[in-house]
Image (spheres, helix red, strand yellow):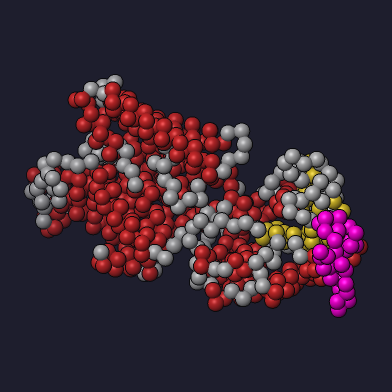
Protein backbone atom coordinates (compact mmCIF):
# COMPACT_ATOMS: atom_id res chain seq x y z
CA UNK A 1 0.00 0.00 0.00
CA UNK A 2 1.21 3.48 -0.79
CA UNK A 3 2.22 5.57 2.22
CA UNK A 4 0.71 8.63 0.58
CA UNK A 5 -1.49 8.67 -2.54
CA UNK A 6 -3.49 11.29 -4.40
CA UNK A 7 -6.64 10.65 -6.43
CA UNK A 8 -7.42 13.12 -9.21
CA UNK A 9 -5.89 15.83 -7.02
CA UNK A 10 -6.02 19.45 -8.19
CA UNK A 11 -4.17 21.88 -5.98
CA UNK A 12 -5.79 25.27 -5.50
CA UNK A 13 -3.51 27.94 -6.94
CA UNK A 14 -5.67 31.09 -7.12
CA UNK A 15 -6.32 32.37 -10.63
CA UNK A 16 -4.89 29.32 -12.37
CA UNK A 17 -6.66 26.84 -14.67
CA UNK A 18 -7.06 23.33 -13.32
CA UNK A 19 -4.26 21.70 -15.31
CA UNK A 20 -3.60 18.02 -14.98
CA UNK A 21 -5.02 16.13 -11.98
CA UNK A 22 -2.35 14.36 -9.97
CA UNK A 23 -2.50 10.62 -9.32
CA UNK A 24 0.62 10.10 -7.28
CA UNK A 25 1.61 7.09 -5.22
CA UNK A 26 4.47 7.47 -2.77
CA UNK A 27 5.59 4.04 -1.61
CA UNK A 28 7.78 3.48 1.46
CA UNK A 29 11.44 3.77 0.48
CA UNK A 30 10.81 6.24 -2.34
CA UNK A 31 12.39 9.69 -2.50
CA UNK A 32 10.32 12.05 -4.60
CA UNK A 33 11.60 15.38 -5.84
CA UNK A 34 9.21 18.15 -6.93
CA UNK A 35 10.72 20.42 -9.55
CA UNK A 36 9.29 23.55 -11.06
CA UNK A 37 9.89 27.26 -11.56
CA UNK A 38 8.91 29.88 -8.96
CA UNK A 39 5.16 30.05 -8.50
CA UNK A 40 4.46 26.65 -10.06
CA UNK A 41 2.69 25.52 -6.87
CA UNK A 42 5.35 23.33 -5.22
CA UNK A 43 4.71 24.66 -1.72
CA UNK A 44 0.93 24.65 -2.28
CA UNK A 45 1.18 20.99 -3.31
CA UNK A 46 3.19 20.10 -0.21
CA UNK A 47 0.74 21.89 2.09
CA UNK A 48 -2.19 20.21 0.35
CA UNK A 49 -0.56 16.80 0.79
CA UNK A 50 -0.09 17.59 4.49
CA UNK A 51 -3.77 18.51 4.84
CA UNK A 52 -2.87 22.10 5.71
CA UNK A 53 -4.94 23.56 2.88
CA UNK A 54 -7.89 22.16 0.97
CA UNK A 55 -7.45 20.94 -2.60
CA UNK A 56 -9.58 22.40 -5.42
CA UNK A 57 -10.77 18.87 -6.04
CA UNK A 58 -9.68 15.28 -5.54
CA UNK A 59 -8.35 13.56 -2.45
CA UNK A 60 -5.17 12.77 -0.58
CA UNK A 61 -4.94 9.41 1.16
CA UNK A 62 -2.51 8.51 3.93
CA UNK A 63 -2.12 4.77 4.52
CA UNK A 64 -5.25 4.25 2.42
CA UNK A 65 -7.48 6.63 4.37
CA UNK A 66 -8.54 10.10 3.19
CA UNK A 67 -6.90 12.94 5.11
CA UNK A 68 -10.35 14.21 6.15
CA UNK A 69 -10.77 10.96 8.10
CA UNK A 70 -7.65 11.57 10.18
CA UNK A 71 -7.49 13.48 13.42
CA UNK A 72 -4.76 16.15 13.23
CA UNK A 73 -2.84 14.62 16.12
CA UNK A 74 -2.85 11.12 14.65
CA UNK A 75 -1.82 12.61 11.30
CA UNK A 76 1.09 14.45 12.91
CA UNK A 77 2.40 11.17 14.30
CA UNK A 78 2.82 9.82 10.78
CA UNK A 79 3.45 12.84 8.59
CA UNK A 80 5.99 15.59 9.15
CA UNK A 81 6.50 18.86 7.28
CA UNK A 82 9.71 20.86 6.90
CA UNK A 83 8.48 24.39 6.17
CA UNK A 84 10.23 26.89 4.03
CA UNK A 85 8.86 29.82 6.03
CA UNK A 86 9.03 30.01 9.78
CA UNK A 87 7.78 32.38 12.43
CA UNK A 88 10.25 33.07 15.21
CA UNK A 89 8.31 35.93 16.80
CA UNK A 90 8.93 34.64 20.30
CA UNK A 91 12.25 33.72 21.89
CA UNK A 92 13.06 30.00 21.90
CA UNK A 93 16.19 27.91 22.11
CA UNK A 94 17.37 25.34 19.57
CA UNK A 95 16.71 22.50 22.03
CA UNK A 96 13.14 23.66 22.77
CA UNK A 97 12.50 23.91 19.05
CA UNK A 98 13.67 20.37 18.37
CA UNK A 99 11.60 19.11 21.30
CA UNK A 100 8.30 20.43 19.90
CA UNK A 101 8.56 17.54 17.42
CA UNK A 102 7.35 15.34 20.27
CA UNK A 103 4.17 17.37 20.73
CA UNK A 104 1.84 14.96 18.86
CA UNK A 105 2.97 12.10 21.10
CA UNK A 106 2.31 13.76 24.46
CA UNK A 107 -0.99 14.21 26.30
CA UNK A 108 -1.88 17.71 27.56
CA UNK A 109 -0.74 17.15 31.14
CA UNK A 110 2.37 15.19 30.19
CA UNK A 111 5.82 16.72 30.48
CA UNK A 112 8.54 15.74 28.04
CA UNK A 113 10.26 12.70 29.54
CA UNK A 114 13.79 11.29 29.24
CA UNK A 115 12.90 9.45 26.04
CA UNK A 116 11.59 12.63 24.39
CA UNK A 117 14.73 14.52 25.39
CA UNK A 118 16.90 11.66 24.12
CA UNK A 119 15.17 11.79 20.72
CA UNK A 120 15.63 15.54 20.48
CA UNK A 121 19.31 15.32 21.47
CA UNK A 122 19.89 12.57 18.90
CA UNK A 123 18.24 14.70 16.21
CA UNK A 124 20.34 17.73 17.15
CA UNK A 125 23.48 15.63 17.07
CA UNK A 126 22.52 14.15 13.69
CA UNK A 127 22.25 17.67 12.26
CA UNK A 128 25.48 18.98 13.85
CA UNK A 129 23.55 21.21 16.23
CA UNK A 130 24.50 19.83 19.66
CA UNK A 131 26.91 22.69 20.33
CA UNK A 132 24.13 25.20 19.56
CA UNK A 133 21.44 23.53 21.73
CA UNK A 134 21.18 26.41 24.22
CA UNK A 135 21.31 29.17 21.60
CA UNK A 136 18.34 31.42 20.83
CA UNK A 137 16.89 30.91 17.36
CA UNK A 138 17.29 34.61 16.62
CA UNK A 139 21.08 34.30 16.89
CA UNK A 140 21.39 31.52 14.29
CA UNK A 141 22.47 31.85 10.68
CA UNK A 142 20.01 30.93 7.93
CA UNK A 143 21.59 27.54 7.38
CA UNK A 144 21.69 26.73 11.08
CA UNK A 145 18.01 27.70 11.40
CA UNK A 146 17.20 25.42 8.46
CA UNK A 147 18.92 22.51 10.19
CA UNK A 148 16.90 23.20 13.36
CA UNK A 149 13.69 22.83 11.32
CA UNK A 150 14.94 19.49 10.04
CA UNK A 151 15.88 18.46 13.61
CA UNK A 152 12.29 19.16 14.74
CA UNK A 153 10.89 16.81 12.10
CA UNK A 154 13.60 14.23 12.81
CA UNK A 155 12.50 14.32 16.48
CA UNK A 156 8.92 13.87 15.26
CA UNK A 157 10.17 10.83 13.29
CA UNK A 158 7.28 10.59 10.81
CA UNK A 159 6.82 7.84 8.24
CA UNK A 160 6.11 10.46 5.56
CA UNK A 161 8.41 13.46 5.16
CA UNK A 162 7.23 16.48 3.20
CA UNK A 163 10.19 18.85 2.92
CA UNK A 164 9.93 22.27 1.29
CA UNK A 165 13.39 23.07 -0.06
CA UNK A 166 15.23 21.21 2.71
CA UNK A 167 18.62 22.39 1.43
CA UNK A 168 17.72 26.11 1.52
CA UNK A 169 20.57 28.23 2.94
CA UNK A 170 22.76 25.17 3.51
CA UNK A 171 26.46 25.03 2.62
CA UNK A 172 27.61 22.25 0.26
CA UNK A 173 28.60 19.87 3.03
CA UNK A 174 25.30 20.23 4.85
CA UNK A 175 23.33 19.98 1.59
CA UNK A 176 24.85 16.55 1.05
CA UNK A 177 24.42 15.63 4.72
CA UNK A 178 20.71 16.55 4.65
CA UNK A 179 20.07 14.67 1.41
CA UNK A 180 21.84 11.72 3.05
CA UNK A 181 19.56 12.06 6.07
CA UNK A 182 16.44 12.05 3.89
CA UNK A 183 17.75 9.04 1.93
CA UNK A 184 18.34 7.28 5.25
CA UNK A 185 14.74 7.98 6.29
CA UNK A 186 13.54 6.41 3.02
CA UNK A 187 15.78 3.37 3.50
CA UNK A 188 14.30 2.93 6.96
CA UNK A 189 10.84 2.54 5.37
CA UNK A 190 9.81 6.18 5.14
CA UNK A 191 8.45 7.99 2.11
CA UNK A 192 10.01 11.34 1.31
CA UNK A 193 8.79 14.15 -0.92
CA UNK A 194 10.84 17.30 -1.27
CA UNK A 195 10.62 20.46 -3.30
CA UNK A 196 14.00 21.26 -4.80
CA UNK A 197 15.49 24.01 -6.90
CA UNK A 198 18.77 22.23 -7.51
CA UNK A 199 18.39 19.89 -10.48
CA UNK A 200 21.65 18.19 -9.66
CA UNK A 201 20.67 17.33 -6.10
CA UNK A 202 17.40 15.98 -7.52
CA UNK A 203 19.23 13.93 -10.12
CA UNK A 204 21.66 12.55 -7.55
CA UNK A 205 19.27 11.79 -4.67
CA UNK A 206 15.71 11.33 -5.90
CA UNK A 207 14.19 8.03 -7.01
CA UNK A 208 11.15 9.74 -8.56
CA UNK A 209 10.46 13.21 -9.89
CA UNK A 210 7.35 15.31 -10.34
CA UNK A 211 7.65 18.24 -12.74
CA UNK A 212 5.16 21.03 -12.04
CA UNK A 213 4.63 23.55 -14.84
CA UNK A 214 3.37 27.09 -14.16
CA UNK A 215 0.15 26.46 -16.13
CA UNK A 216 -0.82 23.50 -13.93
CA UNK A 217 0.49 20.85 -16.30
CA UNK A 218 2.50 18.12 -14.61
CA UNK A 219 4.35 14.90 -15.34
CA UNK A 220 5.92 12.40 -13.02
CA UNK A 221 7.73 9.10 -12.90
CA UNK A 222 11.05 7.42 -12.07
CA UNK A 223 13.88 9.94 -11.97
CA UNK A 224 15.93 8.58 -14.86
CA UNK A 225 12.90 8.83 -17.17
CA UNK A 226 12.10 12.39 -16.10
CA UNK A 227 15.59 13.82 -16.48
CA UNK A 228 15.18 14.47 -20.20
CA UNK A 229 16.85 17.77 -21.13
CA UNK A 230 13.96 18.80 -23.38
CA UNK A 231 11.37 18.48 -20.60
CA UNK A 232 13.58 20.28 -18.11
CA UNK A 233 14.35 23.09 -20.56
CA UNK A 234 10.64 23.61 -21.06
CA UNK A 235 10.08 23.46 -17.30
CA UNK A 236 12.51 26.24 -16.50
CA UNK A 237 12.41 28.04 -19.86
CA UNK A 238 16.18 27.79 -19.75
CA UNK A 239 18.67 26.10 -22.08
CA UNK A 240 20.59 23.31 -20.34
CA UNK A 241 23.65 21.19 -21.06
CA UNK A 242 23.69 17.65 -19.70
CA UNK A 243 26.99 15.99 -18.78
CA UNK A 244 27.80 12.82 -16.89
CA UNK A 245 29.94 12.92 -13.76
CA UNK A 246 30.64 9.69 -11.87
CA UNK A 247 27.77 8.04 -13.75
CA UNK A 248 25.16 10.63 -12.64
CA UNK A 249 23.68 13.31 -14.88
CA UNK A 250 24.65 16.91 -14.15
CA UNK A 251 22.80 19.86 -15.68
CA UNK A 252 24.50 23.14 -16.38
CA UNK A 253 22.55 26.22 -17.52
CA UNK A 254 23.65 27.55 -20.92
CA UNK A 255 23.84 31.28 -21.41
CA UNK B 1 17.55 49.04 40.14
CA UNK B 2 20.35 46.57 40.95
CA UNK B 3 18.27 45.08 43.76
CA UNK B 4 15.34 44.61 41.40
CA UNK B 5 17.67 43.04 38.87
CA UNK B 6 19.07 40.65 41.44
CA UNK B 7 15.54 39.58 42.31
CA UNK B 8 14.67 39.09 38.66
CA UNK B 9 17.94 37.21 38.05
CA UNK B 10 16.92 34.78 40.71
CA UNK B 11 13.45 34.43 39.24
CA UNK B 12 14.96 33.51 35.90
CA UNK B 13 17.65 31.10 37.00
CA UNK B 14 16.42 29.30 40.05
CA UNK B 15 14.43 26.16 39.33
CA UNK B 16 11.28 27.50 40.92
CA UNK B 17 10.50 31.03 39.72
CA UNK B 18 6.84 30.33 40.42
CA UNK B 19 7.55 29.67 44.09
CA UNK B 20 9.33 33.02 44.32
CA UNK B 21 6.44 34.77 42.65
CA UNK B 22 3.95 33.11 45.00
CA UNK B 23 6.01 34.31 47.97
CA UNK B 24 6.16 37.83 46.50
CA UNK B 25 2.39 37.70 45.99
CA UNK B 26 1.83 36.95 49.69
CA UNK B 27 4.23 39.73 50.70
CA UNK B 28 2.53 42.25 48.41
CA UNK B 29 -0.87 41.35 49.85
CA UNK B 30 0.47 41.68 53.41
CA UNK B 31 1.98 45.06 52.53
CA UNK B 32 -1.31 46.28 51.06
CA UNK B 33 -3.13 45.21 54.24
CA UNK B 34 -0.62 46.93 56.52
CA UNK B 35 -0.35 50.26 54.71
CA UNK B 36 -2.95 53.01 54.55
CA UNK B 37 -4.35 55.89 56.55
CA UNK B 38 -3.52 53.85 59.65
CA UNK B 39 -0.34 51.80 59.35
CA UNK B 40 -0.44 48.43 61.06
CA UNK B 41 2.73 46.77 62.39
CA UNK B 42 3.57 43.23 61.12
CA UNK B 43 2.92 41.64 64.52
CA UNK B 44 -0.49 43.25 64.83
CA UNK B 45 -1.32 42.29 61.22
CA UNK B 46 -0.51 38.66 61.99
CA UNK B 47 -2.71 38.87 65.09
CA UNK B 48 -5.60 40.35 63.09
CA UNK B 49 -5.32 37.67 60.40
CA UNK B 50 -5.41 34.91 63.01
CA UNK B 51 -8.59 36.33 64.50
CA UNK B 52 -7.16 38.43 67.31
CA UNK B 53 -5.94 42.02 67.59
CA UNK B 54 -7.84 45.23 68.16
CA UNK B 55 -11.43 45.47 66.97
CA UNK B 56 -10.72 48.68 65.03
CA UNK B 57 -7.80 47.04 63.24
CA UNK B 58 -9.88 43.98 62.52
CA UNK B 59 -12.56 46.08 60.85
CA UNK B 60 -9.96 48.07 58.94
CA UNK B 61 -8.02 45.06 57.65
CA UNK B 62 -10.67 42.40 57.20
CA UNK B 63 -13.63 44.48 56.05
CA UNK B 64 -12.05 47.43 54.23
CA UNK B 65 -8.57 46.56 53.02
CA UNK B 66 -8.74 42.79 52.41
CA UNK B 67 -11.60 42.81 49.86
CA UNK B 68 -9.98 45.68 47.96
CA UNK B 69 -6.51 44.06 48.01
CA UNK B 70 -7.88 40.75 46.78
CA UNK B 71 -9.88 42.53 44.08
CA UNK B 72 -6.72 44.35 42.98
CA UNK B 73 -4.75 41.10 42.94
CA UNK B 74 -7.45 39.25 40.99
CA UNK B 75 -7.90 42.07 38.48
CA UNK B 76 -4.17 42.32 37.81
CA UNK B 77 -3.96 38.55 37.45
CA UNK B 78 -6.80 38.48 34.90
CA UNK B 79 -5.37 41.35 32.86
CA UNK B 80 -1.88 39.84 32.71
CA UNK B 81 -3.20 36.40 31.80
CA UNK B 82 -5.45 37.90 29.10
CA UNK B 83 -2.44 39.76 27.68
CA UNK B 84 -0.30 36.61 27.64
CA UNK B 85 -3.05 34.70 25.80
CA UNK B 86 -3.59 37.49 23.27
CA UNK B 87 0.12 37.63 22.53
CA UNK B 88 0.20 33.94 21.64
CA UNK B 89 -3.05 34.20 19.70
CA UNK B 90 -1.73 37.05 17.56
CA UNK B 91 1.83 35.74 17.47
CA UNK B 92 2.80 39.25 18.42
CA UNK B 93 4.66 39.94 21.66
CA UNK B 94 3.22 43.47 21.76
CA UNK B 95 -0.49 42.61 21.60
CA UNK B 96 -2.84 42.99 24.53
CA UNK B 97 -6.61 43.15 25.08
CA UNK B 98 -6.48 46.95 25.11
CA UNK B 99 -4.75 47.18 21.77
CA UNK B 100 -7.60 45.06 20.38
CA UNK B 101 -10.31 47.52 21.37
CA UNK B 102 -11.85 45.38 24.12
CA UNK B 103 -11.37 48.00 26.81
CA UNK B 104 -12.52 50.69 24.38
CA UNK B 105 -15.85 48.92 23.91
CA UNK B 106 -16.17 48.41 27.65
CA UNK B 107 -15.32 52.06 28.32
CA UNK B 108 -17.85 53.43 25.84
CA UNK B 109 -20.63 51.30 27.34
CA UNK B 110 -19.63 52.16 30.92
CA UNK B 111 -19.38 55.90 30.23
CA UNK B 112 -22.74 55.87 28.46
CA UNK B 113 -24.24 54.16 31.53
CA UNK B 114 -22.70 56.80 33.80
CA UNK B 115 -23.98 59.56 31.55
CA UNK B 116 -27.46 58.05 31.82
CA UNK B 117 -27.05 58.25 35.59
CA UNK B 118 -27.16 54.50 36.19
CA UNK B 119 -25.81 52.97 39.39
CA UNK B 120 -22.45 51.23 39.89
CA UNK B 121 -23.84 47.72 39.31
CA UNK B 122 -25.37 48.72 35.97
CA UNK B 123 -22.16 50.50 34.95
CA UNK B 124 -20.30 47.26 35.63
CA UNK B 125 -22.82 45.27 33.63
CA UNK B 126 -22.59 47.74 30.75
CA UNK B 127 -18.77 47.47 30.76
CA UNK B 128 -19.02 43.68 30.60
CA UNK B 129 -21.48 43.83 27.70
CA UNK B 130 -19.39 46.46 25.91
CA UNK B 131 -16.26 44.33 26.08
CA UNK B 132 -18.07 41.28 24.70
CA UNK B 133 -19.77 43.27 21.91
CA UNK B 134 -16.41 44.71 20.94
CA UNK B 135 -14.97 41.19 20.91
CA UNK B 136 -17.67 39.97 18.55
CA UNK B 137 -17.32 42.97 16.23
CA UNK B 138 -13.54 42.66 16.01
CA UNK B 139 -13.57 38.91 15.52
CA UNK B 140 -16.43 39.03 13.03
CA UNK B 141 -14.93 41.82 10.95
CA UNK B 142 -11.42 40.34 11.06
CA UNK B 143 -12.78 37.12 9.62
CA UNK B 144 -14.39 39.06 6.79
CA UNK B 145 -14.93 37.29 3.52
CA UNK B 146 -11.37 36.08 3.21
CA UNK B 147 -8.87 34.31 5.37
CA UNK B 148 -8.40 34.98 9.05
CA UNK B 149 -4.88 35.96 9.96
CA UNK B 150 -3.27 37.38 13.11
CA UNK B 151 -2.30 40.52 11.19
CA UNK B 152 -5.88 41.14 10.11
CA UNK B 153 -7.18 40.60 13.62
CA UNK B 154 -4.58 42.96 15.05
CA UNK B 155 -5.31 45.66 12.45
CA UNK B 156 -9.08 45.34 12.94
CA UNK B 157 -8.61 45.62 16.70
CA UNK B 158 -6.31 48.64 16.46
CA UNK B 159 -8.74 50.46 14.16
CA UNK B 160 -11.70 49.58 16.41
CA UNK B 161 -9.74 50.84 19.42
CA UNK B 162 -9.12 54.15 17.64
CA UNK B 163 -12.84 54.40 16.86
CA UNK B 164 -13.81 53.67 20.48
CA UNK B 165 -11.27 56.30 21.55
CA UNK B 166 -13.07 58.92 19.47
CA UNK B 167 -16.45 57.94 20.95
CA UNK B 168 -14.98 58.16 24.48
CA UNK B 169 -13.71 61.69 23.76
CA UNK B 170 -17.13 62.61 22.39
CA UNK B 171 -18.91 61.26 25.49
CA UNK B 172 -16.55 63.19 27.76
CA UNK B 173 -17.12 66.35 25.72
CA UNK B 174 -20.90 66.22 26.02
CA UNK B 175 -21.00 65.09 29.67
CA UNK B 176 -21.99 67.51 32.43
CA UNK B 177 -18.98 68.74 34.38
CA UNK B 178 -20.05 67.18 37.68
CA UNK B 179 -19.92 63.68 36.17
CA UNK B 180 -16.44 64.06 34.63
CA UNK B 181 -14.23 63.13 37.65
CA UNK B 182 -16.02 59.79 38.10
CA UNK B 183 -15.73 59.08 34.38
CA UNK B 184 -12.05 59.96 34.26
CA UNK B 185 -11.30 57.79 37.29
CA UNK B 186 -13.13 54.90 35.66
CA UNK B 187 -11.14 55.39 32.45
CA UNK B 188 -7.84 55.29 34.37
CA UNK B 189 -8.89 52.39 36.58
CA UNK B 190 -10.16 52.61 40.12
CA UNK B 191 -10.54 49.88 42.69
CA UNK B 192 -12.46 52.01 45.21
CA UNK B 193 -15.78 50.62 43.97
CA UNK B 194 -14.56 47.08 43.31
CA UNK B 195 -16.89 45.55 45.88
CA UNK B 196 -16.55 41.84 46.44
CA UNK B 197 -13.32 40.23 45.15
CA UNK B 198 -14.88 36.81 44.55
CA UNK B 199 -15.83 37.20 40.85
CA UNK B 200 -12.28 38.08 39.76
CA UNK B 201 -10.65 35.48 42.00
CA UNK B 202 -13.01 32.72 40.90
CA UNK B 203 -12.55 33.55 37.23
CA UNK B 204 -8.76 33.70 37.70
CA UNK B 205 -8.66 30.22 39.21
CA UNK B 206 -11.01 28.78 36.56
CA UNK B 207 -8.97 30.40 33.77
CA UNK B 208 -5.79 28.87 35.15
CA UNK B 209 -7.40 25.43 35.22
CA UNK B 210 -8.39 25.91 31.54
CA UNK B 211 -5.04 27.22 30.28
CA UNK B 212 -2.55 25.10 32.22
CA UNK B 213 -3.14 21.92 30.20
CA UNK B 214 -2.93 24.04 27.03
CA UNK B 215 0.60 25.23 27.85
CA UNK B 216 2.61 23.03 25.49
CA UNK B 217 0.01 23.45 22.73
CA UNK B 218 0.37 27.23 23.03
CA UNK B 219 4.15 26.86 22.78
CA UNK B 220 3.60 25.15 19.45
CA UNK B 221 1.01 27.72 18.32
CA UNK B 222 3.56 30.48 19.02
CA UNK B 223 5.60 28.97 16.14
CA UNK B 224 2.85 29.86 13.68
CA UNK B 225 -0.48 28.35 12.67
CA UNK B 226 0.85 26.08 9.91
CA UNK B 227 3.66 24.70 12.04
CA UNK B 228 1.21 24.08 14.87
CA UNK B 229 -1.24 22.30 12.55
CA UNK B 230 1.59 20.16 11.19
CA UNK B 231 2.37 19.12 14.78
CA UNK B 232 -1.20 18.00 15.42
CA UNK B 233 -2.82 21.14 16.88
CA UNK B 234 -6.44 21.86 15.90
CA UNK B 235 -5.60 25.50 15.29
CA UNK B 236 -8.96 27.14 14.62
CA UNK B 237 -10.82 25.80 17.71
CA UNK B 238 -7.79 26.68 19.83
CA UNK B 239 -7.72 30.24 18.51
CA UNK B 240 -11.43 30.70 19.23
CA UNK B 241 -10.90 29.38 22.76
CA UNK B 242 -8.03 31.80 23.33
CA UNK B 243 -9.89 34.79 21.98
CA UNK B 244 -13.08 34.16 23.91
CA UNK B 245 -11.20 33.35 27.10
CA UNK B 246 -9.00 36.47 26.89
CA UNK B 247 -12.08 38.59 26.15
CA UNK B 248 -13.95 37.14 29.10
CA UNK B 249 -11.00 37.75 31.43
CA UNK B 250 -10.71 41.34 30.21
CA UNK B 251 -14.44 41.93 30.57
CA UNK B 252 -14.47 40.66 34.17
CA UNK B 253 -11.38 42.74 35.03
CA UNK B 254 -12.79 45.90 33.44
CA UNK B 255 -16.12 45.38 35.19
CA UNK B 256 -14.34 45.18 38.56
CA UNK B 257 -11.86 48.01 38.28
CA UNK B 258 -12.50 50.09 35.18
CA UNK B 259 -10.02 50.39 32.38
CA UNK B 260 -6.45 49.68 33.54
CA UNK B 261 -4.04 49.68 30.66
CA UNK B 262 -0.56 48.30 30.34
CA UNK B 263 -0.68 45.36 32.77
CA UNK B 264 -1.65 42.92 30.04
CA UNK B 265 1.06 44.17 27.72
CA UNK B 266 3.88 44.62 30.17
CA UNK B 267 3.71 41.74 32.64
CA UNK B 268 3.91 38.83 30.15
CA UNK B 269 6.56 40.61 28.16
CA UNK B 270 8.75 41.27 31.22
CA UNK B 271 8.37 37.66 32.30
CA UNK B 272 9.25 36.43 28.85
CA UNK B 273 12.48 38.44 28.91
CA UNK B 274 13.45 36.62 32.10
CA UNK B 275 11.83 33.18 31.85
CA UNK B 276 11.85 32.46 28.13
CA UNK B 277 8.63 31.66 26.32
CA UNK B 278 7.54 28.32 27.76
CA UNK B 279 3.83 29.04 28.30
CA UNK B 280 3.67 26.42 31.02
CA UNK B 281 5.74 28.84 33.09
CA UNK B 282 4.75 32.18 31.53
CA UNK B 283 0.99 31.77 32.04
CA UNK B 284 0.94 31.02 35.79
CA UNK B 285 3.80 33.49 36.29
CA UNK B 286 1.76 36.18 34.48
CA UNK B 287 -1.18 35.51 36.74
CA UNK B 288 0.96 35.97 39.88
CA UNK B 289 3.05 38.89 38.63
CA UNK B 290 -0.02 40.75 37.30
CA UNK B 291 -1.65 40.34 40.69
CA UNK B 292 1.48 41.56 42.48
CA UNK B 293 1.82 44.60 40.22
CA UNK B 294 -1.77 45.75 40.66
CA UNK B 295 -1.78 45.07 44.41
CA UNK B 296 1.30 47.24 44.88
CA UNK B 297 0.02 49.88 42.47
CA UNK B 298 -3.31 50.09 44.30
CA UNK B 299 -1.52 50.35 47.66
CA UNK B 300 0.46 53.30 46.29
CA UNK B 301 -2.66 54.79 44.70
CA UNK B 302 -4.43 55.04 48.04
CA UNK B 303 -1.41 56.03 50.19
CA UNK B 304 0.74 58.38 48.07
CA UNK B 305 -1.37 61.50 48.53
CA UNK B 306 -3.78 60.18 51.20
CA UNK B 307 -6.53 60.90 52.01
CA UNK B 308 -6.82 61.70 48.27
CA UNK B 309 -6.71 58.61 45.98
CA UNK B 310 -5.00 58.36 42.61
CA UNK B 311 -6.35 56.32 39.69
CA UNK B 312 -4.49 53.01 39.81
CA UNK B 313 -3.88 53.03 36.04
CA UNK B 314 -1.62 56.05 36.51
CA UNK B 315 0.51 54.11 38.98
CA UNK B 316 0.77 50.96 36.86
CA UNK B 317 2.00 53.08 33.96
CA UNK B 318 4.39 55.13 36.10
CA UNK B 319 5.83 51.96 37.65
CA UNK B 320 5.65 49.91 34.52
CA UNK B 321 7.06 52.18 31.85
CA UNK B 322 10.53 52.67 33.36
CA UNK B 323 10.97 49.05 34.44
CA UNK B 324 9.74 47.80 31.08
CA UNK B 325 12.08 50.13 29.17
CA UNK B 326 14.95 49.12 31.46
CA UNK B 327 14.37 45.39 30.90
CA UNK B 328 14.00 45.90 27.18
CA UNK B 329 17.21 47.93 27.10
CA UNK B 330 19.06 45.24 29.07
CA UNK B 331 17.85 42.38 26.90
CA UNK B 332 19.87 41.38 23.89
Q: Is residue B134 visible?
A: yes
Q: In terms of depth relative to the viewer, which is nearer, B268 or B35?
A: B268
Q: What residue is rendered at 30% in x and 57% in y? A: B323
Q: In terms of depth relative to the viewer, which is nearer, B325 or B251?
A: B325
Q: What residue is rendered at 23% in x and 22% in y? A: B176
Q: Is residue A116 visible?
A: no
Q: What residue is rendered at 87% in x and 67% in y? A: A241
Tell which residue pokes out farthest to the front in this image: A255
Q: Tell me, yes or no, whether the highlighted magenta stretch contains residue A242.
A: yes
In the picture, measured across the screen, residue A166 lies left or right of residue A230, that is left
Q: What residue is rendered at 33% in x and 26% in y? A: B170
Q: Tell me, yes or no, whether the highlighted magenta stretch contains residue B297.
A: no
In the picture, measured across the screen, residue A195 lies left or right of residue B192, that is right
Q: In terms of depth relative to the viewer, which is nearer, A112 or A156?
A: A156
Q: Position of residue B208 (x, y in %)?
A: 42, 49
In the picture, residue A254 is in which quadrant? Answer: bottom right
Q: Position of residue A64 (x, y in %)?
A: 80, 52
User: Looking at the image, is B66 positioned above or below residue A249?
Assistant: above
Q: Which region shows up in magenta? A: A226-255
Amino acid sequence: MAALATHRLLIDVPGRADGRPLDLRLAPGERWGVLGPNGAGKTTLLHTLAGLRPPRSGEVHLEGRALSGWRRRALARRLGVVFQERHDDFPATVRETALIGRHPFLSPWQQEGPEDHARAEAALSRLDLSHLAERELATLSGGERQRVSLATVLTQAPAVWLADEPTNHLDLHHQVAVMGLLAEQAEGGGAVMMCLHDLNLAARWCSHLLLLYPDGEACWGPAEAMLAPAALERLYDQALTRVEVDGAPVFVPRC
Amino acid sequence: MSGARAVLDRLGRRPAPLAWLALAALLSLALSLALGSVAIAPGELAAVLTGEGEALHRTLVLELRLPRSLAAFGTGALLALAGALMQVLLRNPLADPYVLGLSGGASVAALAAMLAGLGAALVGGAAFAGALVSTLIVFGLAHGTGSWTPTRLLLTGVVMAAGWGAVITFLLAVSPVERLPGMLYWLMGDLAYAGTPWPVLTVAVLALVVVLPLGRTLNVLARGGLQAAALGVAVRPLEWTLYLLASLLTAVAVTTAGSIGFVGLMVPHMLRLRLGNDQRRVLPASLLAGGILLTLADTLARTLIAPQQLPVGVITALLGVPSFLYLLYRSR
